[in-house]
Amino acid sequence: MTAQPHGIVELDRVAVRYGEQAVFANLSLRLEQGSFTILTGPSGAGKTSLLQLLYLAQPPSAGRVFWRAAGWAISACG
């Protein structure tokens, strides 16, 4: 049995690839309810890809994205 994530959104060893190009790999992140997070970086660093993962517009190439709130949970796996 897998332990339930504690954050409102959790990325577990997520990777995003476009063909042979790896945008990022093995990324783990937890965003808690009520927290503030700032995302910065140069052009092409993967900011948009990360945001697309967070709102489930794009599945990860590997790893797991898990949302939990108000009695429901959803996950996307790569």
Image: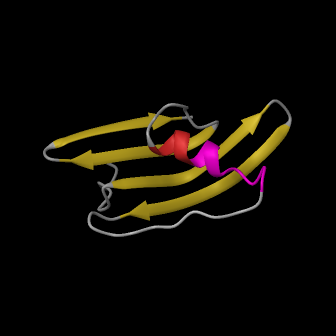
Residue drawn at x 70%, y 63% as measured from the top left: 41
Quarter containing the C terminus: top right
Q: From what the image shows, is residue 68 above or below residue 28? A: above
Residue drawn at x 29%, y 62% as measured from the top left: 6
Choose between 1 and 20: the one closer to the eye.
Answer: 20
In the image, 70: left or right of 75?
A: left
Residue 64 is situated, as x and y percent measured from the top left of the image, at 49, 44
Choose between 53 and 73: the one closer to the eye.
Answer: 53
Residue 21 is situated, as x and y percent measured from the top left of the image, at 84, 40
Q: Quadrant of residue 59?
A: top right
In the image, 45: left or right of 1?
A: right
Residue drawn at x 63%, y 43% as measured from the top left: 49
Q: From what the image shows, is residue 35 above or below residue 71? A: below
In the image, 65: left or right of 14?
A: left
Residue 67 is situated, as x and y percent measured from the top left of the image, at 33, 45
Residue 26 is situated, as x and y percent measured from the top left of the image, at 65, 56
Q: Is residue 57 magenta?
A: no
Residue drawn at x 14%, y 47% as measured from the top left: 70
Q: Quadrant of residue 52?
A: top right
Query: Which residues lie in the magenta part?
Result: 43-50
Which residue is most to the right? 20
